[in-house]
Image (tube, rainbow, N blue to C red):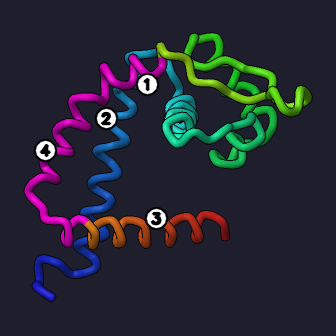
Amino acid sequence: MEPSQTPTQLIRLLRGLTSELDLFGAEFAARNGLHPTDLRGLIHLLDADRAGAVVTPGRLGAALGLNSAGTTGLVDRLARSGLIRRERDEEDRRKVRLVVEERAVELGEAFFGGLVADLMAAMGAFGEVELAVARRFLVAMTGVVAAARAD
């Protein structure tokens, strides 16, 4: 392994990327009157929406590590902001699902679209094999952090 690619240096690079993404997200949150937790919740909901997954308040709270009161506050804030709505589940009317409003998608695209385009362009400098290794690496690192958080 080259000295410039020691595991410690890779960890520092991951931390640096995480910090930059957090700062970018914090700017979005501040511009739109959102709390950082609101942004994490909205990102989770947008990702689930793109994947066609149904998210209930309970699932959202579990994904973000929030208790019931924190989840209710989060959902209330996002709904008041017009970014999501609560909707009764068609199969089980006792359940409530959270639905992303088009405004949230548009807001996210307006702010993050340029960054995503730039990230995609930067990825163009890498071959399929390199991107596959990067993906495997990031999945493994995310798993380690998630496991540590669960402990």
What is the secondary structure assignment of the residue under circle 4? Answer: helix
Distance in Å between CA atoms under marks 1 and 4: 25 Å
User: Is 77 part of what is drawn in magenta?
Assistant: no
**Closer to us: mark 1 or mark 4?**
4
| Circle nearer the N terminus (1, 2) | 2
Q: Quadrant of the N terminus?
A: bottom left
Q: Toward the viewer: 72 or 86?
A: 86
Q: Which residue is mark 3?
A: 142
Q: Which residue is mark 1?
A: 29
User: Is 111 part of what is drawn in magenta?
Assistant: yes
Dividing the picture into quarters, in which one does residue 57 lie? top right
Distance in Å between CA atoms under marks 1 and 2: 9 Å
In the rendered image, residue 127, in percent from the top left (x then y), is placed at 13, 65
Distance in Å between CA atoms under marks 3 and 1: 23 Å
At label 2, the amino acid type is Phe
Q: Residue at x 8, y 56 (%)?
A: 125
Q: Toward the viewer: 41 or 118?
A: 118
Crowd class of label 2 (few under 14; some 14 to 19; many from 20; radius 10 Å): some
Q: Residue at x 68, y 27 (%)?
A: 98
**Image: magenta residue range:** 104-131
Crowd class of label 4 (few under 14; some 14 to 19; many from 20; radius 10 Å): few
| Circle nearer the N terminus (3, 4) | 4
In the rendered image, residue 29, in percent from the top left (x then y), is placed at 43, 25
Residue sitting at the far right: 94
